[in-house]
Image (spheres, grey):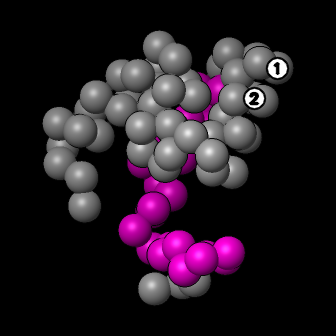
């Protein structure tokens, strides 16, 4: 579980540069990052909304990478 300060920094980055905030939270080669990147290219506001959703509501610790696929922990 990330600290409150880390979440605050990710939220500020998500407002300024949405893909960067998602990248710090979920990684660069994840589905969340690419969705946020596409939404930001199509429109800045949808990118911000999805970035905030991805940072605040999607739990990255719920999924474990076990090789080629993700397994629910």
**Numbered disc 1: secondary structure:** helix
Please provide the residue range marked out in magenta: 46-70
72 in relation to 59, above or below:
below
Q: Position of residue 61 (x, y in %)?
A: 40, 68
Q: Position of residue 35 (x, y in %)?
A: 73, 40
Q: Is residue 7 left or right of residue 50?
A: left
Disc marking residue 39: 2
Q: Position of residue 8 (x, y in %)?
A: 26, 32
Tell me which residue sits at (62%, 40%) in the image: 33
Q: Position of residue 30 (x, y in %)?
A: 63, 50
Q: What residue would you read off at disc 1?
A: 42
- Label 2 – label 1 distance at C-alpha: 5 Å
Q: How many marks?
A: 2
CA neighbours of label 1 inside 10 A, class few (<14), some (14 to 19), many (20+): few
Q: Is residue 4 left or right of residue 8?
A: left
57 in relation to 49, above or below:
below
Q: Is residue 31 left or right of residue 63?
A: right
**Numbered disc 2: secondary structure:** helix
* Disc 2 and disc 1 in contact, CB within 8 angstroms: yes
State yes or no: residue 53 in magenta.
yes
10 in relation to 70, above or below:
above
Splitting the image into 4 quarters, where does residue 38 fall?
Answer: top right
């Amino acid at each position: 579980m990330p600290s409150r300060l880390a979440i605050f920094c990710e939220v500020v980055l998500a407002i300024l540069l949405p893909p960067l905030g998602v990248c710090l939270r979920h990684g660069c080669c994840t589905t969340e990052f690419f969705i946020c990147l596409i939404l930001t290219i199509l429109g800045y506001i949808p990118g911000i909304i999805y970035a905030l959703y991805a940072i605040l509501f999607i739990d990255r610790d719920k999924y474990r990478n076990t090789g080629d696929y993700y397994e629910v922990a």
